[in-house]
Image (spheres, rainbow, N blue to C red):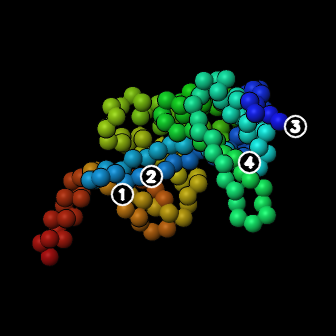
Amino acid sequence: MDNPQGKALSLDYLAGLVEGEGCFTLQVQEKRGPKVVVIPRFQIAMTDLLLIEDVSATLKHLGIGHHVGNYQPKGPRKPVKHIAITGLKRLKAFTDILAPHLQGEKKMDAEILQALVTSRLAQSDRADYTEREVELVNALSERHYAKRKVTLRPAGRYQPVGKRFSLAIENPSETTRRDTAANAV
């Protein structure tokens, strides 16, 4: 049976797939100079290639841009097809449409990501992260990455700290006092 175009799914069915197989996540990238970019992302992967085509067709029908990729695991395993949604405007459209249909944990993840994306869209492209945005990043990352920690400094640099993942803005005056005290010793 061939399904090259896929068929559009209901939003409730799509929400069920997202709750079972999807993931709202963050990717932290260090850019040139003292800058960090937090990239919100949604991803879903399945070995049911026809069903993932239906998810893609649904996203296309809703006007939500997405990337579809294929992966062949080593050994005698089934091929995997995945869909990724990145980009603030695409994620906003996706969460605006789907969040009301989600339940439980995924609904909370979607609402956190939705608030972060909405806030970032209200800023200029190169604006530093606000304290509220850092709180939202922390809220989502703590739910998924309890074993890593990253500290976001005022200039946007980050560094691993301990075994947890967290983003925090240090008070610049405290940093200056600490650096001054360390240099005086």
Q: Is residue 42 above or below residue 119?
A: below
Residue 66: % across, % down:
59, 35
Label located before the other in sequence (2 or 1)? 2
Label located before the other in sequence (3 or 1)? 3
**Type of the residue with mark 4:** Met
Q: Which mark is residue 1?
A: 3
In front of the other: 8 or 36: 8
Residue 59: % across, % down:
65, 29
Residue marked by disc 2: 28
Q: Secondary structure at mark 4?
A: strand
Q: Is residue 106 above or below residue 167?
A: above
Q: Comparing marks 2 and 1, which lies closer to the viewer?
A: 2
Residue marked by disc 4: 46
Q: Which corner quadrant holds the C terminus?
A: bottom left
Q: Secondary structure at mark 1?
A: strand
**Residue drawn at point x = 54 percent, y = 43 percent:** 41
